Amino acid sequence: ILDEFGEKMSLRVDLNRPDVGLGVEVRNDEAFVYSDVIDGAGGMPLGTQPRVVGLLSGGIDSAVACWMVMKRGCPVAPVYFDNTPFTDE
């Protein structure tokens, strides 16, 4: 990168006190150069585990459970069900 752009843009490299940190990721025939890293939700990449069905009842606990399973890499097929005929509420 420095060989290609360094002389044209008057760039220098200072490994002790850099002004900007750059990252380079090479995949197949392409290179991606970046200066910022944005943290995601954490966990495993979505789709690395089998698909699951998440039962959503309208409460916060079922939505949180689906979110936690998604962080483990499982794609979630959400299914809403109304359980009021079977509960006291």
Image (spheres, helix red, strand yellow):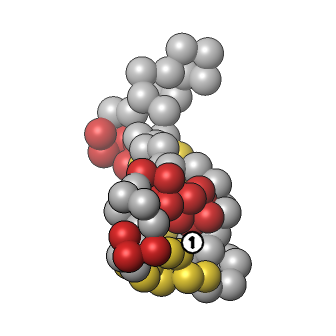
In the displayed structure, 38 sits above or below 31; it is above
**Would you say 27 lies left or right of 18 here?**
right
* Residue 29 visible in the shown view: no
Q: Secondary structure at mark 1?
A: loop
Can residue 36 be seen in this snapshot? yes
Relative vertical location of residue 31 with respect to residue 82 in this rendering, above or below? above
Question: In percent of the image, x 48 and y 44: which residue is there?
Answer: 39
Amino acid beneath label 1: Leu
Q: Position of residue 49 (x, y in %)?
A: 70, 78
At 68% from the left edge and 84% from the top edge, which residue is drawn? 50
> What residue sits 50% from the left and 21% below the top?
18
Mark 1, other Cα within 10 Å: few <14 / some 14–19 / many ≥20: some
Q: Is residue 43 left or right of residue 89?
A: right
In front of the other: 40 or 16: 40
Question: Is 57 or 51 nearer to us in this picture?
Answer: 57
Residue extending furthest front?
A: 88
Residue closer to the observer: 5 or 88:
88
Residue corresponding to mark 1: 46
Residue 38 percent coordinates (x, y): 43, 44
Q: Residue furthest left?
A: 9
Residue 72 percent coordinates (x, y): 67, 63
Locate the C terminus by quadrant. Answer: bottom left
Q: Is residue 84 left or right of residue 21?
A: left
Give percent across and percent down for residue 70.
56, 66
Task: Tell me which corner region of the image, top left, top right, bottom left or bottom right, holds residue 45.
Answer: bottom right
What count of labels does the image hold? 1
